[in-house]
Image: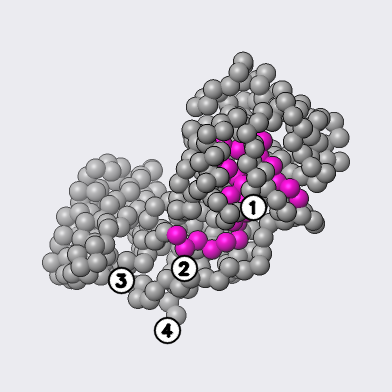
Amino acid sequence: MIVNYQLFLVIPPGLEDLALREVELKCPISAVQLHKGGLELEADLNWIIKAHCELKIPTRILMRLTTFKIRDFPKLYQKFSTFKWNEYLSHPEPEWEISCSKSRLNHTGRIEETVKKALAEAMRKQPLGMDWQKKNFGPQTFYIRLVDDNLTLSLDLSGDPLYKRGFQKIKGEAPIRENFAAAFAFEILHDLDSKVTLIDPMCGSGTLLTEALTFFTPLHLRKFSFEEAPFFKGKLVKLETNDNKLPIDHAIGIDLNGELLEKVSKELKENLPITFKHQDSLKEKITRETSVILCNPPYGERIQIQGKRGSFLKEAWEKFIQVDAPLRFGWVLPSDMDDLFSKAAEYRVKSKRHLKNGGMAVTFWIWERT
């Protein structure tokens, strides 16, 4: 019998529409609801496995376990002490992520204390097996969300955030998160009719390039939390690599940090078609006849730049747009600089989205040559 589960895909706010497009492309399923910060849907275990291996934009996937109205601690204890934990629990001491908003129960510490006591009582009535000790299972994470006295209990199926791919371990000083990089690469490239050379002129450890080149490659380099849950009886089957790829003929990464480029090049070896160049992209023409530039430039926060932030970024903007003149140009900028870069001769703004990157309000721009 096929069992369907209620799921919530956690998405960085501002990327929900791209995440939905990715689901429709890789793991199509009916009745997906788009919310701020995520996608809600119903799917079986096979879909859960496929989604974890193939989707590159979500941060994690949660399984909705129960929802109920709650206004007092005795009822909270009663609900959790009678819940069927054996269907989901793989470790006797899970971790809890609790949030409250506009609810009578608003003390997260006391909520956690009550839930832990209720779970201990439940375990006396429905003892947990010893698999967690024999197989060295790690603690799971359960999410408790209280809004307007409505409590939702969810199980984290992913474990470590999904942007931790396990693919590339060497990082620069201010790397962009992998799921942001995947989303940006997908948006700027997916609708092109022919292959292009993808160039990151300030590439750091090359995350934008590696995510663009592996956007359709299934992920099998790490474990997921659901593999230890009681409802998962099988084995994670290695998915076949399909022929789909973003339209990239070659990728070029340019940076001033030659030592970092050498380390990254050795780590990636011949696995991906990336050429790394140690040079100043603001002083030499970097594009080919058909190229797309995509970059996350330094803002002077964690990576130092010469001169003032506005002057540095203005110089980079004019060089990339006027001298290199790519088919498309995409970069991430602090949102307080939006007015400086809104117009460019012979280019139109193809898209513009507002996000938070490392707590900073940023705008991801894509310009297209007219």
The residues colored magenta run 196-221
Q: Tell me the kind of residue under disc 3.
A: Pro
Instruction: Tell me, for residue 49, which label it has, or none.
Output: 2
Q: Nearer the viewer, mark 1 or mark 2?
A: 1
Find numbered disc 2 in the image and state the secondary structure of the residue it sits on: helix
Expressed as whole percent of the image width and height from the top left, the position of residue 272 reads 60, 54
Residue annotated with mark 4: 1
Find numbered disc 4 in the image and state the secondary structure of the residue it sits on: loop
Expressed as whole percent of the image width and height from the top left, the position of residue 119 reads 20, 60
Instruction: Tell me, for residue 297, which label it has, or none.
Output: none
Q: Identify the colour scheme used.
A: one colour
Q: CA distance from mark 1 to mark 2?
A: 28 Å
Q: CA distance from mark 4 to mark 3?
A: 16 Å
In the rendered image, the vertical position of residue 65 relative to residue 176, given as above or below: below
Q: CA distance from mark 4 to mark 1?
A: 44 Å
Between 210 and 133, which is closer to the camera in this rendering?
Answer: 210
Task: Say whether residue 122 is left or right of residue 273.
Answer: left
Q: Quadrant of residue 291?
A: top right
Q: Tell me the kind of residue under disc 1.
A: Pro
Residue annotated with mark 1: 273
Label 3 or label 2, whichever comes before in sequence order: 2
Q: Nearer the viewer, mark 4 or mark 1?
A: 1
Q: Quadrant of residue 205?
A: top right
Query: Which residue sits at x=76%, y=54%?
Result: 195
Find numbered disc 3 in the image and state the secondary structure of the residue it sits on: loop
Task: Say whether residue 313 is left or right of residue 48.
Answer: right
Residue annotated with mark 3: 230
Q: Tell me the kind of residue under disc 2.
A: Ile
Label 1 or label 3, whichever comes before in sequence order: 3
Query: Which residue sits at x=52%, y=36%?
Result: 260
